[in-house]
Amino acid sequence: QVQLVESGGALVQAGGSLRLSCVASRSIFSFNHMGWYRQTPVKTRELVAGITRGDSTDYADSVKGRFAISRDNAKNTMYLQMNNLQPEDTAVYYCHAWDYITNYWGQGTQVTVSS
């Protein structure tokens, strides 16, 4: 059973920065794709940023130029650097991984941005 554990969520002021981390219980090199999703009580879960095994990345239009996704295979960890945070970025952020067979999800970490 693969576990994904997120950390780094916090309350920050608009314009601030946070870095989220997602640590996997097995080698992340085994995952074809990893990503960060976010969800609020009034919006469905949406992909914020994704990264492939080959380090190709993609971003939601709303975060391009502000967020950066990366992965450290040696540490079995994926990161999301979030800069210039805005109140609309407030959500629970979830780590996701896919290995061609199974989708894995973390438990989520809360990010709250005050205006």
Image: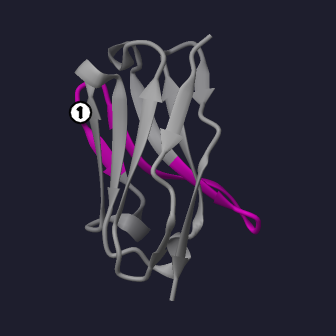
Taking depth in this image into account, of 7 and 61 the one nearest to the observer is 7
Tell me which residue sits at (65%, 57%) in the image: 39
Query: For mark 1, what is the residue?
Result: 55
State the SS at label 1.
Answer: loop
Neighbour class for label 1 at 10 Å: few (<14), some, many (≥20)?
some
Vertical placement of 74 versus 87: above or below? above
Which scheme is used to colour this image of the protein? one colour
User: Residue 46's image quarter?
Assistant: bottom right
User: Residue 38: x percent and y percent?
Assistant: 57, 55
Residue 113 placement (x, y as % from top left): 51, 76
Q: Position of residue 12 (x, y in %)?
A: 46, 74
Depicted 38 relative to depicted 104: above or below: below
Nearest the viewer among 67 and 9 is 9
Q: Amino acid at mark 1?
A: Asp
Which residues fall within the magenta stretch? 37-58
Q: Specify whether residue 2 is painted magenta.
A: no
Above or below, 50 relative to 40? above
Residue sitting at x 57%, y 15%: 2
Q: Quadrant of residue 26?
A: top left
Residue 79 higher or lower than 65, as above or below = above
Quarter occupied by the N terminus: top right
> Residue 87's x, y, as percent?
52, 80
